Image (tube, grey):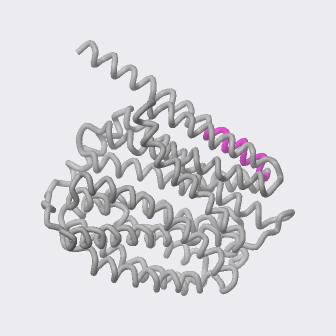
Amino acid sequence: MDDQQANLKKVTFGLFIGSFISFCNLYLFQPLLPLIADHYSVSATRVNWVLAAATLTLSLSLVPWAIYSENIGRRKVMFISLYASPIVGLCMVFSDQLPLLVLSRALMGVALAGYVAVAVAYMAEEFSPKVFLIAVGSYIGANSLGGITGRIYGGIVGEHFGWQTAVIGMALFSLIIAILVTLWVPPQENFERKNKRLNIHIKEAVTHLKTPLLWIAMLIGGFNFALFVNLYTVMGFRLVAEPFSLPVGLVSLIFLCYLTGTLTSRLSGVWSLHFTPITGMFIGTLVSLLGMLIALIPSIIAMLVALLMISSGAFFTHSLAYAWVSSKAQTAKASATALYLVHYYAGGSLGGFYLIYCWQNGGWPMVVIGGGLLYTIILCLCYALKRQQRSQVTQSAYT
């Protein structure tokens, strides 16, 4: 029994560090954007492609990887993803032009999507329901911790030794992690190959997108992440510029504010036991909106408080919307959650160009105006989701 428990812990930790390194790689470049803009002498809008390319291709690759894993197994897809990441990472070092770096980052997004798409499915098939719930909690924690670590590492190492050194170090660390996951995560025992035709997968996806109760929640997730991740990007440019003129390494520490989101994402489960998820999404959005407004105060303390509030509200909203889609999907739940993540990461990718445009054309006040418009859209979507739920309840009462 002790050996079985020890083995289970090893497998869970292997999946944890696989998730950790995937999100380290995904967000490594976010604090480095001001440095890279100077390196290539380009605008903030153009350099944003370095971050956006990876999140956009990741979002577009999630469903194809999930479908492919139905044929070859989750473990093989995870390994392809983990070993491809350091190879692509090293290619970035030789990108002497911005378009080549953006292309490498796009390939990185495709590679990382493999692990993100199937790790939870592996756990669901191999672990008991009780162990699965614990493992998923650790996995989500690894996502957050990996994103924070990757950003802080990138900012500090990039500032003192150059962004190329940061990339090489991350690639070597990624290779070590890939080897450890290979040793600790065993072949699947409960995987059953499903040879669904592609048209069946497409029909399932279309069905989800035609279901307002699901699609509206996906839009909430997309707009929420578009604001959350890119308000941090703009804040990075704001703190590096005058009158603050802070070093990139120090500015990268703002991502520690993500930790409040880790707390509120856990509280979202408690909230759902006593209150409605839609009300929680509404409150989470208002908290983030208030945080953005507080950042109008030109004080570093005020900005940090603002980021803490933005993180708290955004993670709370995301956790509730993600769980909503998973629970409300009547069939093909895996494809439903994958579609949610498509909206989520596509929003994060495209939202950067919108908010950076606002930043370049009017500073933080214009960001507040532009961001306020998107927050208003989220609140309207919450209202629409509530009306849709009431309509469905009414229809069920008459059938």
In the image, 123 versus 104, the foreground residue is 123
Instruction: Please give the range of residues in magenta.
Output: 363-375
Task: Look at the picture and state if 40 lies above or below 230.
Answer: below
Q: Residue 211 placed where, x, y %?
A: 34, 34
Residue appearing at x 55%, y 62% in the figure: 52
Magenta-drawn stretch contains 281: no
Task: Look at the picture and state if 372 lies above or below 389.
Answer: below
Magenta-drawn stretch contains 370: yes
Residue appearing at x 31%, y 63% in the figure: 119
Q: Is residue 372 left or right of residue 104?
A: right
* Predominant SS of the magenta segment: helix
Q: Quadrant of the N terminus?
A: bottom left
Counting the numbered discs, the total is 0
| Residue 259 position by quadrant | bottom right
| Residue 249 position by quadrant | bottom right
Residue appearing at x 53%, y 86% in the figure: 168
Q: Residue 162 placed where, x, y %?
A: 65, 84
In the image, 196 versus 132, the foreground residue is 132
Residue farthest to the front, as pictured: 2
Residue farthest to the top, as pictured: 398
Q: Residue 357 placed where, x, y %?
A: 70, 54
Q: Quadrant of the C terminus?
A: top left
Task: Look at the picture and state if 360 lies above or below 12.
Answer: above
Q: Is residue 71 left or right of residue 49?
A: left
Q: Residue 95 placed where, x, y %?
A: 56, 83
**Residue 111 in view:** no
**Residue 83 in view:** yes
In the image, 227 versus 304, the foreground residue is 304
